[in-house]
Image (cartoon, rainbow, N blue to C red):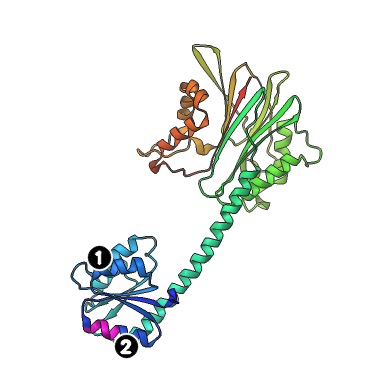
Amino acid sequence: MSNFATRILIIEDDPIAQVFLGRILEEQGYEVVIANDGEEGVKQAESFRPALIICDWMMPRMDGLEVCRKLKADPELSMIFLILLTVRGSVEDRILGLDSGADDFLAKPVDPDELRARVRAGLRLNRVYQALQEQKQMLEAELVEAAGYVRSLLPAPLDGKVNIDSRFIPSRQLGGDCFDYYWLDPDYLAIYLLDVSGHGLGAALPSISVLNLLRSQSMDGVNFYQPNHVLRALNEAFQMDDQNDKYFTIWYGVYNQAKRQLVYSSAGHPPALLISNTNPDDTEVKQLKTISLPIGMMPDTKFSNQRCDIDLASTLYIFSDGIYEIMQPDGDIWGLDGFIALLSDHRRTIADQGLNYVLNHVKTLSPNESLDDDLSLLRINFG
């Protein structure tokens, strides 16, 4: 059975050099394959998948520099260690070879001992890369599992007199956004969304901690019907000096469906947007926000409540800043005003097509339709 770690591809158009190089390497126990020119060499690299390639610089049908460029441009072949054979010894030539993708050089005529030493060194580096790749794959698998766990914690859509739909799109496999909504009792609905600074696992872990803490309502002496009490308790529990310098923004509200009133408080978070049509020809947008520092920045931060009446057929949007802080192809940030215009001007379309319409529009604003930040979005319809 062939061993990937001992596979060597020789790309050389000189038959004498082929025999000379092949014999020396086979005597060392390596599995050797020969290609007669650059084009054949690239095809052999794709099928043979060697650990190391020895390639002549001067060849017909694709020279060594072009072979280097093609191999390094292929993600699946780019980490094969590549030694360039050459009679060129100037600094300029070596720079050209390195810039084209060569990892090492071997001067012609080839010294057998130097050949063996450079091959051993190249294969050592290849083994290190393979070990790193295995570790990377294991880490990616664990991150996928962790991402699945985070998604499993997020709430399902809510149906009833209050309807809630949501979307969560991390910029990586894991993100620092998190949200939840649940009935404190038959009349009071708690809703919140938080955004931990940073990305990846380091941001996901604090957000999960906050979610579990709020969902269990295990903070002694905290009135969960009063948003400012909740934020004050979170600020005491999650000071950034004790949380690896992580802080988070949050918007927290409690809706009383009997009185149709919403009490809310926020900590450094974007405003929630309340959209209503008291006049059929006029859409009103209210920005719901209180002023304070994010959670964890200062131990003595003050938090306040605001109260808002909810009209019939109103819609509330709560979101993280990743929904609007999008760098457009022209270099300008789309911004909160653009997001507000989208929600108000396309209210009827969004009502018919849902949040996917919003997300599809947002993605078209970014180059390659990629997101630089985590994105969370809640849409609450009050019947």
Above or below, 250 relative to 257: below
What is the distance, in whole Å, between disc 2 and disc 1 at their CAs?
26 Å
Magenta-highlighted stretch: main secondary structure? helix
- The question of residue 129 being in magenta is answered with no
Instruction: Tell me the element at label 1.
Output: helix
Describe residue 292's horizontal placement relative to residue 59 as left or right: right
Task: Identify the image quadrant of the N terminus.
Answer: bottom left
Residue closest to the eye, 371 or 308: 371
What residue is rendered at 58% in x and 34% in y? 166
Q: Could you tell which of marks 2 and 1 lies nearer the N-terminus?
A: 1
Instruction: Tell me the element at label 2.
Output: helix
User: Of the residues shown, which amino acid type is indicated by label 2?
Assistant: Pro
Q: Quadrant of residue 121?
A: bottom left
Crowd tier of the residue under label 1, counting other residues whose Cα lies within 10 Å: few below 14, some 14–19, many 20 or above: some
Which mark is on residue 112?
2
Crowd tier of the residue under label 2, counting other residues whose Cα lies within 10 Å: few below 14, some 14–19, many 20 or above: few
| Residue 261 in the image, given as x and y percentages of width and height | 69, 21
**Magenta span covers which residues?**
16-21
User: Of the residues shown, which amino acid type is indicated by label 1?
Assistant: Glu
| Residue 188 in the image, given as x and y percentages of width and height | 73, 26
Residue closest to the eye, 169 or 227: 169
Q: Is residue 65 visible?
A: no
What residue is rendered at 39% in x and 62% in y? 76
Above or below, 294 relative to 305: below
- The question of residue 18 being in magenta is answered with yes
Q: Which residue is mark 1?
A: 66
